[in-house]
Image (spheres, helix red, strand yellow):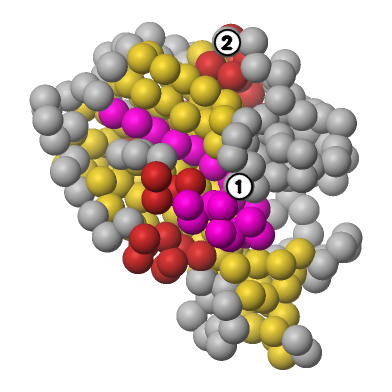
Amino acid sequence: MAFRIVSLNTGGGRLHAPLMRYLSGCGADLLCLQEMVHTPEARAEWLTYRGHGPDLPQRANLHREIAALLPRHLAWFAPAARGPLHDGDRLVRSQFGLSTFLDDRHAVLAEALDFVHGAFSPHGWGDHPRPRNVHCIRLMDGSDGDVLTVCHLHGLRDEGGKGDTPARVAQAHALVALIRRVWRPGEKLVVCGDLNLLPDSSSFAILGGLGLVDLVTARGFTDTRTSLYAGSVRFADYMLVTPEVKIANFDVVAEPEVSDHRALLLDIA
């Protein structure tokens, strides 16, 4: 199996031009993207999220644009919530969640999409911690028939920080249960995304019950954020694999900067 996975929190597409260049050229068989935006009612290309902090530009139909950029990839969009973005003074209902793009040379054998915290919020973003969902796909490599399961998520954000909370522990157990609905023990398994966890989180021990080990910390990386992020806690994104996954290359991509998060790139041999 020669298979490339890229996981990235896109930051709502705020660095749109470099992001699109990177995604078009990164050669990913599977893209696992978080903080994705889909706004069918949008008239403008850019909208604004107005929360408790500074206003944040959002690319109104980022999912649709990436799908057009990668016409040979199957595309999924999985919203966790629908809430208001602003087009000037006009409120626009926008969906926010996960996108998955798989090269259509590969066959989808099974999939699961569900929430690991809360439920879909159709009437606003809500308070933190907000609903969180996970997309898992079990696929067969189009070249050699090898089977791989990949699950990705955008983990709970808590305004108190990235430390352990009962909600995060419950999220980890729910994630394990969801993985077991798709993955077959003994087959390759990858779990990735912006997990919003510290490296010593008990969530990793819970996921370790499936044989998963994080590559970011195991390989000595100490920073998954870019220069656009001003915070001091530099861990957010992780890529976990079981021993069956034979690693040809793994990188926390420092350049180009396409978000306030670095992309995680895994080549499976």
Q: Is residue 162 left or right of residue 92?
A: right
The segment highlighted magenta reads: 3-21
| Residue 231 appears in the rendering | yes
Q: Residue at x 78, y 59 (%)?
A: 127
Label 2, secondary structure: give it. Answer: loop
The x, y position of residue 83, in whole percent, is 66, 73
The picture quadrant where one finds residue 248 is top left
- Near mark 1 (Cα within 10 A), the count class, few <14, some 14-19 or many ≥20, is many
74 w.r.t. 87: above or below: above
The x, y position of residue 166, in whole percent, is 73, 33
Q: Residue at x 11, y 25 (%)?
A: 144
Instruction: Give 113 or 73, whichever is nearer the viewer.
Output: 73
The x, y position of residue 149, in whole percent, is 32, 31
Q: Which mark is residue 258?
A: 1
The x, y position of residue 105, in whole percent, is 16, 43
Quadrant where the C terminus sits is top left
Q: CA distance from mark 2 to mark 1?
A: 22 Å
In the rendered image, residue 170 lying in the magenta stretch gets the answer no
Q: Residue at x 58, y 10 (%)?
A: 219
Looking at marks 2 and 1 on the same chain, the residue that comes earlier in the sequence is marked by 2
